[in-house]
Amino acid sequence: MIAARFVLGRLAGVLLVLLVVAAATYAIFYLLPADPARLSCGKPCTPENLQRAQQFLGLDAPWWGQLGQYLLGIVAGRTFGTGGGAIDCPAPCFGYSFQLSSTVTDLILQRLPVTASIAVGAAVLWFVSGVAGGTAAALRRGRLADRAIMTVAVAGVSAPAYLVGILGILLFGFALGWLPTGGYVPLTEDPLQWLLHLLLPWAALAFISAAVYARLTRAELLEQLSLDHIRTARAIGLSEPAVVVRHGLRNALIPVVTVFGLDLGLLLGGAVITEKVFSMQGLGSLLITSISSLDLQVVVGITQFSAFLVTAANLVVDLVYGVLDPRTVRR
Amino acid sequence: MRTRLPAVALIAVAALGLTACSSGAGEDSSTTLTILTPASTVPLDPASSQNLATTSLSLLDRRLTTWKVEEGKDAVVVPDLATTTGTQSDGGRTWTYTLKDGLKFSNGDPVTSEDVKYGIERSFSDQLTGGLSYHKTLLEGGSDYRGPFDGKQLSSIETPDDRTIVFRLNKAFGDWPWIASMPAFTPVLESNGAPATYAKAPITTGPYKVESIKDGTALTLTRNTHWSAKTDSVRTASADRVVFEEGQNQTTVVQNLLTGSGKYADAFGAQYLGAADLSAASRDAQGKQRLATSEAGPIQYLALNTKRGELKDVRVRQALNHAVDRRSYLLASGGSAAGIAATTLITPGIAGRQAYDLYPAGTSGDVTKAQQLLRQAGVSGLKLTMLLQNDSASLAQGQAVQQGLQRIGVAVTLKPEDAESFYVDAAADDKPFDLVLASWQPDFPSANANISPLFDSSQIGGGNYNLSQYDVPEVDRAIAAAQAETDQSAAQADWAAIDRRIMQDAPVVPLIYAKQSFLHGSGVGNFFIPSFPAYPDYMTLTVGK
C-alpha cells in the first residue's frame, strides 16, 4: 500500500517533469534568433513563401500555442496539410520532421538501438570495473595497488571523451588494425561485427566513467568499514569476504547506484561525443544534427525521451534503494 | 582495465581471420563505389533538394538538362532527358522541350512529359519546400500555386503530347536552360509521388536505383537496368553499386582514405577538407596523389552595408577595398592551398568571366591610396562592426581583415555568431552592423547566379543574400536586361559589364576564391575538382581498374 502510493506519486512527478521540459524546449526555441521556416523556404526565398512555410509549420503561433498543438497531438494525433498530399501522424504523435520525412517516434525508434547498444554495454563495463577497482583500492588502502588504481582513475576522470576515443581509434583501428574505425552494425545482422564495432566505444566510455565509480566506491567503502557494526561483525567471527560484501559494500553501493542510474538514463538519451567520434548515428548525433538544422520537433522529441529516461532511471534507483536499504521506503 | 585488454586482443584476432575470409569471398568482377559522407541521411526527394546537378541525386535522377564539367573548362549546360537545352520563343518567355525516345523509369514505365510536369508541381507544395526555387518565381502563376495534391495543375506548364513540355514564364529569362537542370525538374510518377513516402522508395530515371536505405548508416544503390547509356551523353556510371556510408567522422575518413585499403581504395570523401585535415593529407606521400584540389571556388567576400553611416560614402568603401590585406587573409585561411586572391564578382569556372582589378591593392594592401581616399571623404577615426561566424576558421579570417584595416585607422569590432543566428541576422531586413564576412557559391554556372542574388535590390532582407543592401536602379535594370537576353554570348558580355559596374560602387570587398580539396582512394579515376562547381563530378568518375 505504502509502496503503491510511493510509486504513483513518483509517476505523477515524472509526468510533471516531462511537461516542464516540453514547455522549456518550446520557449527556448521561440526565443532563439533563428527562424526554422527560413530553412524550409527554399532558395531563393520570397516573403510569400516564407510566410507560407511559417503557417504550415505552425510557427506563426506563440510558443504556448505550439506547445498546445504538440500536447494535443500526443493524445489525438496530427495531420499536416490537406488533400492527397496530407501527412498523417497518428496518436501518440510526438511530432513530424519534414527535413527527414519521418515521424519523430520512428526516428527515435530507429536510432535507439545504436545508443542503447553503446550505453548498456559501456555501463556494465564501467560499473563492474569501477566497483571492483574501488573495492580493491579500499582494501589495500595506502599501498601500491591503491595508488596505481587511483592514478588511473584520475587520468580517466580528467581525460576528454573525444581524445580517448580518437586515441583508441588510432591505436586499435589504424596502427594495429584489430578493430573497425567506426560505424555500427545491427546485432540482428551480424552479432560478431556488432560486438567488434562496439568494443572501442565501450572501452572509451568505461575508461572515463569507471574512474568516478572507483573513487566513489573507495571513499564510501572506507567510511563503511570504519563504522562500529563492521567491528562487531568481525568480532563475532564472520569471514572477511562476508564482512566486506554483505555489511560494507552493500551500504557503500547506495550512493554509487544513485549515480549509476542517472548516468545510464542520461547516456541512453544519447552519447553525443562518443557517437560523433565513432561515426555512429544514435540519438545523440540525431539531436545535434537537429539542433543545427533547427528541426524543432525532433529536438523536442529527443529531449522529452531523454528526460523520460532520466526520470525513469531515478524511479528505478529509488525502488532499488528499497532492496538495498528497506528503511528508505518505510520512512 | 588491465585484465580486460587481453580479452579485447583475443576477440580482435578472431575478427582478423574472419575479415580475411569475407574479403576473399567477395572477389568477383563487380565494382562498388563507396562515398563517405558526414551527413546522417542522403535526402532523396528532388522537390526539396538543393543538390548541385553533379552530386548525389545525379546518380538516381535525370532532369531536362544537366551540366557537363571537364577538368580545366567552364561548366556547360547540355541536354539530359530532353533533346535540346530548350527552344525559346516569345522573346525568351516561352521554352519548349522534347523528351528523348525510349526513356524509362526504373520500374519499366515510359517517361512522359506529364511525369516531368508532376515532378515540378510537387515542389510547390507546402510539404516539400526547402529546395532550389528559382522556377517558382519565374513560372507564370507560380506564386499562387500550392502543388498537385489537391488535384490542381499549374497551367503555365503545358504538355501538348507525351514527349513535349512547354513552360510559360512571367518574364523573359535567358538562363532557363540552367533552371531546367535543377532537382525539381526530375520526372516523378504520380503513383510514387506522395510526400510522406516518395523518399523511402523512389522510382528513378538515372543509372541507379535504391537497393536499401538504412538511415544513419548507409544508402545502397544498384544499377537501374532500364537506364540506357545511349540516351545519356554525360553519365558514365562506372560502378555496379554505390554505397553512401553516412555519419562519417571526417578525421577518420581522411585516415581511412590515406591508408586506402579494402573498400577505401574505391572510395572518396564527399566533404571538402578543413585546414587541419588538408595539411595532414598534403604531408602524406600517398595523400598528395589522392588529393584533388580546385583551382578556385566559392568567393569569400566582405559585404559593406551601403545603408549605414560613413559606409554610405563610396570613397570610404573604395578605401576599404584598397586597404584590405589579402595575403594575411589567405594565410589565416590556410595558405595557398586554401584559395587565390579575388578581385571580381563572377567566379572562375563561370563562362564569360573577365578578369579585372579596379582597386589594385598589391599582395597586402595599398595603405597610402586608402588613406588618401579617407581624407577626401573627410573621415577619420572610423569604427565598424563585423558580423562573422563563430568558428575558429572564420575568427582567424576576421582578425586578418581587422588588422589590415587597422593600418588606415579603421577600428573593426568582431561580432561572432553561431551559424543559425548568423544567417538569420546577416539576411535580416534591418542590419545592425557594418560589415559581414560572407561566402557565395552560385547555384548554377551562370554569371547571373553570381550576381543577381547578391546585388539585385529585390534580394535585400527577408532571408535573402543582398547583404550590402546594395540598391542602384541602374544596376537593377541592367540585371533584368541581362537575365532576359537569350543569346548566351551577348548575355555573358552583359554580365561582365555589370560585374565591373557594381564594383565601381564597391559594395563588397572580394577577398579570395576558396579552393576546395577532396580525398579519394587509389581505385577512383577521373577524379578532379573544377572551379565550379568545386565538388567531384559523381556522374563521370570511375572505379576499379
Image (cartoon, coloured by chain):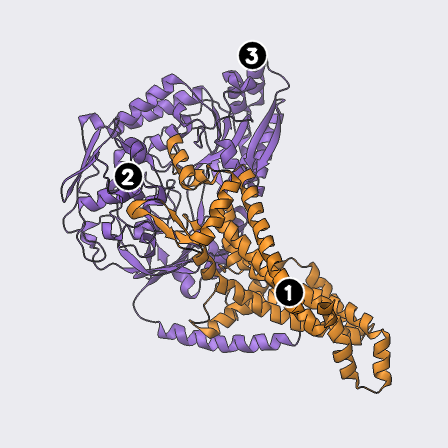
Chain colours: A orange, B purple
Q: Is residue B50 left or right of residue A155?
A: left
At label 3, counting other C-alpha atoms closer than 10 Å, the crowd grade (few under 14, some 14-19, many 20 or more) is few
> Horizontal and vertical percent for residue A61?
47, 38
Q: Is residue B281 visible?
A: no
Q: Chain of mark 2?
A: B
> Horizontal and vertical percent for residue A91?
42, 55
Judging by the rendered image, the residue that carries numbered circle 3 is B376
Tell whether label 2 touches label 3 (CB within 8 Å).
no
Judging by the rendered image, the residue that carries numbered circle 1 is A5
Query: Which label was assigned to residue B379?
Result: none
Q: Residue furthest left?
A: B161
Residue found 51% across the figure and 50% down from its top: A299
> Horizontal and vertical percent for residue A306?
56, 57
Kindly report the distance in space between the C-alpha atoms of the residues bearing marks 3 and 2: 45 Å
Kindly report the distance in space between the C-alpha atoms of the residues bearing marks 1 and 2: 74 Å
Please tell me how many numbered marks the rendered image carries.
3
- Depth check, mark 1 against mark 2: the one in front is 1
Judging by the rendered image, the residue that carries numbered circle 2 is B76
Name the image quarter holding residue A51: top left
> Horizontal and vertical percent for residue A248?
78, 76
The amino acid type, in three-letter code, at marker 1 is Arg
The amino acid type, in three-letter code, at marker 2 is Val
Q: Chain of mark 3?
A: B
- Work out which quarter of the rendered image holds the C terminus of chain B and state it: bottom left
Kindly report the distance in space between the C-alpha atoms of the residues bearing marks 1 and 3: 83 Å
- Work out which quarter of the rendered image holds the N terminus of chain B and state it: bottom right
Residue found 75% across the figure and 75% down from its top: A249
- Depth check, mark 1 against mark 3: the one in front is 1
Mark 2: secondary structure: strand
